[in-house]
Image (spheres, grey):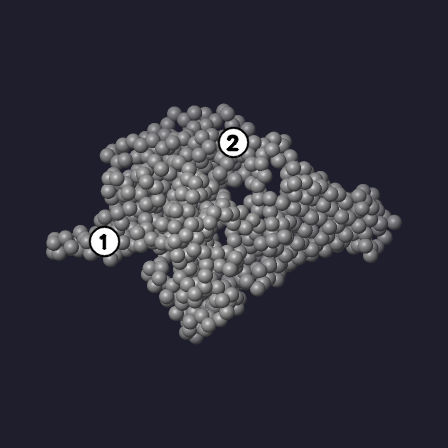
Amino acid sequence: MIPIVYSLLAFSLITTSVTAQQRITDKALDALEKNNKEAKLLEDTDDDFKGLANATSWQEESAVILAQKTSFSFDKKSLSVGGRIGRNLLGLLYAPFTLGTSIVLANTINETSILVQETERRKILLQDKFAVENYSILYFRLSAEGDAFTARVIKKDGTQTTVDLTDAVRVENPSSVPALFTSYTDSRPSYSYRPTFYKVAVPDMEEGDIIEYEYVNFNTQKYSQNPDYKEFQPVYYLCNRSLPVVKQVLEVVTEDDRYYVSYKSQKGAPDFIQTTAKGNKVYRWTDNNRDALTRGRFVNRLLQLPSVKFQVVYARNNSKNLVWFKDNEDPKSNITLEQLSEKAKTFWFNPGKLRTTGEYTDGLKANFEETAKGIYKGMKKKGITNTTDDEYVRKAYYSIRAQTLYNNWSDFAFAKIYSALLAKNDIAHEIIVTTANNETTIEAASFAQELKWLIRCKNKYYANPDEHRNPEELPSEVCGNPSVRFNALKEEGKPTIEPLPQSDTLANTLIANIKVSLNHTETSDLLNVDKTVEAQGLVKDDLTDEILAYTPFMETDFRNYDGTGMWEGMNSQQEAKAISNFNEQKKEWREEKPKMMKAMAEDYYDFAVTDYASFKLMQDGRSFKKNVLKYNEIYTLDDAVNTVGDDLLLSIPNLAGGSQGKLKKEELTRTLPVYLEYARAYNYNITCPIPAGYTARGVESLSREVRNEAGSFTVKGRIDNNNVIIEVRKTFNKSEVSAQQWPLITELLKAAYGFSKAKILFSKS
């Protein structure tokens, strides 16, 4: 429950002081040098990096990936117990003295794991100054035993210089590391998992240089017991990358012939080819001459662009007795909702047969029922079990919340345990099964891990909690999706096939009340902005991470959740130390938060922020009763006022964020569906007093109205009590429209952009 998360936070506060960026240590550099030699990185013998075609097709691009290769090597030997499926080091050591029974015993009672070696090599041609700046910082992980990284710069004349890593500094937030430098099989950073990353500057690069780097990450895939069958987490790979690619390769190497690759190629992506190399089974995927990701916005990449998704499967018997599909080819075919409903029911009501096939029980120290019993016992002590059904449903959700966050429970584990808690108080509920609409459609689902499991209780929906989600809030990736619904406790009966609720413009709203004042002096003209924002629904979800960054939002969680404070369970000395360190952390956050918000404001308005005076979080939106995000910021904009003689032109319309809607020429035509994620509405209420001695002109002419099937853009401008009042409302009515309806969206975007460039004239009276 909540104390677990707080104890971890408190421990980090006790043991870690607020310091400047940490330089990489000599010990870490020695380990890196040793690992690099063993890994033999950037060898010139790799045929995939020889005789590469030139990048003449993309001379106008900032940079081009000449070659990149990602390799996954499964069943690598490990020194830890259970280094690979079917093997246990301690069991083997004691086998001669136990007539072999130690192997059976060790593989039965000990946690087993497999070590996956993931290697990434990338060679990038830098064609302009932007590319040089963009790749002048490289990131690498040094967290697991064996992690390795090296990089080099290849000049135009062919000379090579190895990048010096002695000045690397530690990355404080591993979640901020760009995806180019993170491995697919690594767990995502969380409360309990904080991988160590470093970043290093690459000096003296020029246009026309090549940056080449390679890294190895060792990632442990853990599970309980020793299964006959095991599915590893799927990998999703877009053919189009952020840069054009001359050649790209994926390889899955298995040292055991019981491993297989199940995959689905989509939208014309190549297939995997099975080969053999050095006695190992190799699944190889190759793609050539692929353009960069489309520059157009509103693209659902994994559904609309060429991609391949694959999953490594371990099957001890030769028939590959797959649980979800009948054979290794089956994932390449689509399924119907009816087929999915039967599979989902089998999965739900027979978890004992399925628990070791994937990550469904990861993070659990006991089975579903025992875990639920433990949580229920804690709820009973607090008197929660004797409350009303509505309060019990919410408190049960909060009782699960911290555990699933800390231990990264799967959606399936959340649903099983939440369902068990509801059943203990005889509260009727149903199971909902769907997929994430930014990952796959239900018909194209190829792996059991692609399913999203939710609970429906009293016509409300409950999803696996994230750091900020409240009860009854659904993530955007499931809203409006087709789904399968069935009784959680009775296997009899036919499942219901129906869409999940589609969120609308009333549920997903942003209201910004903006007070503007002119700061007119003989030497400068500035706009002072006092902005208060309220966001709810999925708009809130999009904003929350950035708005709550560098704020101590967790301080008041105990009021919203289970009544437990951050320092509960500590002795007085530990509590004093933790509070002291937390106060130091908050001091640092107070300094960093304005810098971050200033950068966001400058990016949003395209104006310089000369002074970011304050940021105030009024309500974090993370409570069931107070689920609206509210904040205020005060800053000063430069370049937003132009002078024409004694008259002033103010770019007040730009404060509604319309500049973000500018369309490029290549965006005017479209062949892909328009993915808007969710319906939403933005409301901007702008007030600006008219300075003494001036008259405002052209305010009423700002009024306009554009409405169509896809949404609306309306503006009302007026003068009221010597104030310029501008009310702006933008809406998108749907989560997706067809490519043929793209002109409806462009009509709205053009109207918003045109309005943002309008100005208000304050003429000298």
The quarter in which the N terminus is drawn is bottom left
Relative to 543, 83 lies left or right: left
Q: Which residue is rendered at x = 49% and y = 35% of the image?
A: 305
- Quarter where residue 752 is shown: top right
Residue 127 numbered mark, or none: 2
Relative to 171, 679 lies left or right: right
- Give the residue at the far bottom of this rendering: 572
The three-letter code of the residue at mark 1 reads Asn
Q: CA distance from mark 1 to mark 2?
A: 54 Å
Vertical placement of 140 versus 531: above or below? above
Badge 1 marks a residue whose secondary structure is: helix
In the image, residue 459 lies at what x, y percent? 52, 57
- Give the residue at the far front of this rendering: 493
Q: Which residue is rendered at x = 43% and y = 60% of the image?
A: 418
Residue matched to label 1: 107
Q: Residues within 10 Å of mark 1 (few under 14, many from 20)?
A: many
Relative to 339, 294 lies left or right: right
Q: Nearer the viewer, mark 1 or mark 2?
A: 1
Q: Which residue is rendered at x = 63% and y = 45% of the image?
A: 732
The three-letter code of the residue at mark 2 reads Gln
First in sequence: mark 1 vs mark 2? 1
